[in-house]
Image (spheres, grey):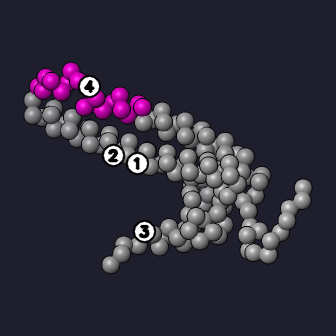
Amino acid sequence: MTKRKNKTKETITFPASLLKPIGKFLVEEEKKIIKKIINLKKEDPFADPSRASNNASPDTDAEEQFGHMKNAAIRDQLRRRLVQVRKALTRVKIGNYGTCEKCRQLIDTDRLTIYPEATICIKCLKKEEKPKK
Ligand SMILES: [Zn+2]
């Protein structure tokens, strides 16, 4: 293998030995998340047309409303996670997995072990989470 080294700092890459299991994990995650979203959709009280038409009492109505909101919120979270997982998968394929998409530094492997779909490093994440004043 002949690799031309350009004299930039771009020599840091994610260890290849870790890429394979992470790629596999991400594929599994993707499947799991999609499954969860589908199941949640089925559980959504609003998804059942027969329920919506025969509201027994305002109580059940409120309960269903709450159930729907909770369900939708979880689905929303899962969908966002799915986007992250797919993004990470693409990065595994194109070979820039493990580097921060903001600062181009290598993301801490400890962070990636807990949160393999991470696409930015902790430093940049903290910067992003800080509310702008
Ligand atoms: Zn960063």
Dominant secondary structure (helix, strand or loop) of the stretch shown in magenta: helix
Report whether residue 113 is seen. no
Secondary structure beneath dot 4 equals loop
Task: Please report whichever mark, 3 or 1, sits nearer to the chain's N-terminal start.
Answer: 1
Which residue type does callout 2 highlight?
Answer: Ala
Q: Could you tell me which secondary element the residue under label 2 belongs to?
A: helix
Alpha-carbon distance for marks 3 and 4?
A: 38 Å
| Spatial separation of the CA atoms under disc 4 and disc 2 | 18 Å
Marks 1,4: beta carbons within 8 A? no
Q: Which residue is mark 3?
A: 129
Q: Identify the residue under disc 2.
A: 73
Q: Quadrant of residue 55?
A: top left
C-alpha span from label 3 to label 1: 17 Å
Whether tag 1 and tag 2 are in contact, CB under 8 A, the answer is: yes
Q: Which residue is depicted at the point 40% across and 48% down?
A: 77
Residue placed under numbered mark 1 in the picture: 77
Return the x and y of residue 32 as percentages of the image width and height. 52, 36
Picture quarter with the C terminus: bottom left
* Label 3 Cα crowd, 10 Å radius (few <14 / some 14-19 / many 20+): few
Assess whether residue 54 is covered by the magenta stretch.
yes
Q: Secondary structure at mark 1?
A: helix
